[in-house]
Amino acid sequence: MTTNLKSSQIPGAERRGQLPNPKSQTSKSFFDNLEVVARERGSLLCVGLDPRGSDPRSVREECFRLIDATVDFVCAFKPNSAFFEALGAEGMTVLKEVIAHVPVDIPVILDAKRADIADTSEAYAHAAFDELGVHAITVSPYLGGEVLTPFLNRPERGAFVLCKTSNPGADEFQTLVVAAHDRSLFETVAEHAQRWNTNGNVGLVVGATDVEALARVRALAPDLWFLVPGVGAQGGDLEAVLRAGLRSDGLGLLINVSRSIARAADPGAEAKRMRDEINLLKDELGRMKDERIPGFILHPSSFILPLAKDLLASGCVRFGQFTLKSGIVSPIYIDLRRLPSQPEILRRVARAYANKLRTLTFDRIAGIPYAGLPIATAVALEMNRPLIYPRSEKKEYGTRSTVEGGHNQGETVVAVDDLITDGGAKVEAIQKLESAGLIVRDVVVLIDREQGGAKTLAAAGYQLHAVVTLRELLEEWRALGEVTSERYDEIIAFLKT
């Protein structure tokens, strides 16, 4: 364990900002050196330093204790400049002392989200790299690539460009479609970052709270390092993050954890646990490499637990005794018509559908009224694909259309609905699409109740694709304590009738 050294006692502290490379005497980029550190320390864990003390002394002590407790288990530290700036001039002095307290062979990434025009960016870069002595900094691309030049023109220093952040409001701008590229804004940033990486020192900030977006960014930037906040207190799924973001060499991710380590009873033990869990999952994924789906299509298991939680939170699933339209009494009731009234959950559901749809080939999405139509609309917006839908009744005026929305004979459409029971209603809707000269091969639903729907569709020549089965959801609800073993058995028995 590192002792509590003053910055003047740390060997090489005067040259902080350039990591020593024990394997070579030649100049290396920041990420070349980071890879050496990650391999030699056996860690992808980055500990965030977000002190909540009210005075400079308590902040200094808090950060020193956290560094000393976790230094053996990390690949990097990430102090958040805002918490030091809030304490005024003394806070900035403490920030410099905290940075100097980190052993010189461990990267320090300043979380400051800097970038501005002309000399302002030069000043920001000088302050971070020369005055504070950090190895890398987070930067904002909003003003364009030219303002990042001062951060990127020194290969030994790194810049993590904000791409898809972990905060709940990130989608307000970051998922907007950029018309010139026919991609979302965050995907456009990832593409531009590839071009900016001429010195091998550009990384991306991609949050753990949207693993589908993380996977899409990895597909666009297969070689870049990602700084990934959001695991821990923000609820990011570590296994899903590793599945979506790891490079083929098992590197490329810095998993940043702040509050859940800092607030643990034993921060050192928690950091060790996190490092070991990352390595264990990484090893398991390495053994499963042949089973992983290429590109930015996530393993289906990535969506099951979040969906299980969302369906309960939205009231789309209830347990009890419910009389169905058929007159049968069911111990479970699923009503996905409630999804449109909760847009955040609907958005996550749309991403789960999109993950499944990316494995298929089609020209248009066809939403099946009524429950499937708002869901299909959300999916079409998520994927930026055209939407049509068959009418429940033939239109007796105007165009007399049976299918609404622009389409051409001979096009292939994929039918999207909410769930499937026996499949009869799906076949009826598909026949209306086919009567308009469209080709249908696939049907995608959120939930398969496993009550014969797949067989009905297969007999009619269509293939069913479900994001999740009801049995899989029941397993998660039982594990969460939302369904007792008795209730679970009751529902399984009902589904078999």
Image: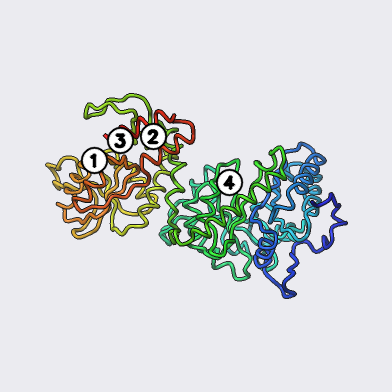
Cα distance between the residues tagged 2 and 4: 26 Å
> Residue shown at 46%/37% (left/top)?
309
Cα distance between the residues tagged 3 and 1: 11 Å
Identify the secondary structure beneath mark 2: helix
Residue type beneath disc 2: Ser
Which numbered disc flags the more N-terminal residue, 1 or 4?
A: 4
Residue under label 4: 230
x then y, percent, for residue 49: 71, 47
Residue type beneath disc 3: Leu
Q: Residues within 10 Å of mark 2 (few under 14, many from 20)?
A: few
x then y, percent, for residue 232: 60, 43
x then y, percent, for residue 78: 69, 51
Cα distance between the residues tagged 3 and 4: 38 Å
Viewer-proximal residue among 372 and 324:
324
Is 403 rendered above or below residue 187?
above
Identify the secondary structure beneath mark 4: loop
Residue type beneath disc 4: Gly
Is 139 rendered above or below residue 152?
above
Cα distance between the residues tagged 3 and 2: 28 Å
Which numbered disc flags the more N-terminal residue, 2 or 1?
A: 2
Residue under label 3: 495
Considering every residue shown, the one lying at the far bottom of the view is 26
* Quarter holding residue 75: bottom right
Identify the secondary structure beneath mark 1: loop
Which numbered disc flags the more N-terminal residue, 3 or 4?
A: 4
Which numbered disc flags the more N-terminal residue, 3 or 1?
A: 1
Residue type beneath disc 1: Asp
Question: Closer to us: mark 3 or mark 1?
Answer: 3
